[in-house]
Image (tube, grey):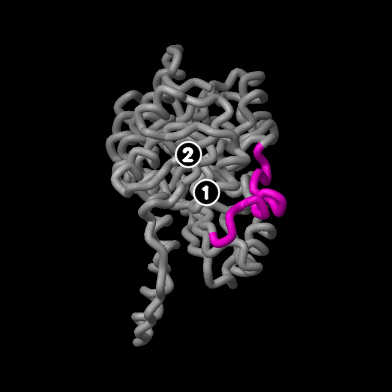
Amino acid sequence: MTYRVLVTATNYSELCKEAKALLLENGCDVIENDFGRPMTFDELKDRVADVDAVVAGVDDWNEDVFKIAPNLKAIARFGVGVDNIDIETARKYGISVTNAAGGNSNAVAELTVGLIISAMRSVPQLHASTREGKWDRFVGDEIINRKIGILGFGNIAQSIAKKLQGFDVDVMAYDKFPNMAAAEKLGVTMVDADTVVAEADVLCMMLPSLKETHHFMNAETFAKMKDGAYFINTARGALVDEAALAEALTGGKLRAAAIDVYETEPTSVDNPLFSIPNILTTPHTAAETYETYHGVGLITAQAVLDVLAGKTPKNLL
């Protein structure tokens, strides 16, 4: 029997050759996203009527889509966060939802550490000004002896903590369900969220995007931070009130920020954050590495095949 698998994650043929081959070898037709961005409802509507499974990017998967996809049995999220998928409703429609937990942890952790240093030393701004023939002598901060606070302590946060061990910093973290064994192994002090926010010289947002964490960082929360602290977000845009972040930057509360995610994605050129000089911005690219595409591609392809074969897949949500 031939199954139809829609892949809405981008660059699939180029970066996930082995995963695509695995699907094809097991009798699947693969329909790819050729838009180079998340697909809209109208674009999905034209493609899901006879689809049996999806390898999903960050498009919205909800009841409106499920209603017009009667054959859909599996959604394998090409990543970790599943805030774009209505899991409870999917279950009612008999659709299994999986993610690639741990599959992009190293990539996101590496970029997070890179953003910390880039923000503290104004690397992007100096790069741009040097190419303009200028010779700016920016005086930045060193990361050594700083307090690094991490909100959330899942796989990615633990990888960040591990990488920071060689920088001679103190790492503290908050998590609703703290992994004390991992914290002890990595030398991380587990504290409450208020302590992380108030005492961190560098605050890294790594919480999951849930109803209760929406705008976790808002005007009140930013006000609790140290004067001159740095803020990093490589988790989800919905966790941060962008207007409050802008005010914290322009009002002098924060020395700088670096963000990879936005409340609305793709974000627009007129986003007020883009007019602020002391913020570093990247386009939700933390997981965009060849290694991540290879590994997550295989994880999601196997999850699809397991569901279609009537097996219980790994990372079933």
In this picture, residue 64 sits left or right of residue 82? right
Evaluate if marks 2 and 1 touch, with contact meaning CB atoms under 8 Å apart.
Answer: yes
Q: Name the foreground residue: 134 vs 6.
A: 134
What's the magenta region? 213-228
Provide the secondary structure element on which disc 1 rests: loop
* First reached walking from the N terminus: tag 2 or tag 1: 2
Q: Name the foreground residue: 36 vs 114.
A: 114
Using the rendered image of the protein, determine whether residue 35 is visible from the camera's viewpoint.
no
Name the residue at the bottom extreme.
133
Q: Circle 2 sits on which residue?
A: 172
Kindly identify the residue that appears in the image at 56 percent across and 36 percent down.
208
The amino acid beneath tag 2 is: Met
Q: Name the foreground residue: 20 vs 282.
A: 282
Kindly identify the residue that appears in the image at 36 percent across and 74 percent down.
127
Percent x, y of residue 23: 35, 29
Provide the secondary structure element on which disc 2 rests: strand
Name the residue at the front extreme.
145
Is residue 16 in the magenta section? no
The amino acid beneath tag 1 is: Ala
Q: Circle 1 sits on which residue?
A: 200
Kindly identify the residue that appears in the image at 44 percent across and 38 percent down.
157
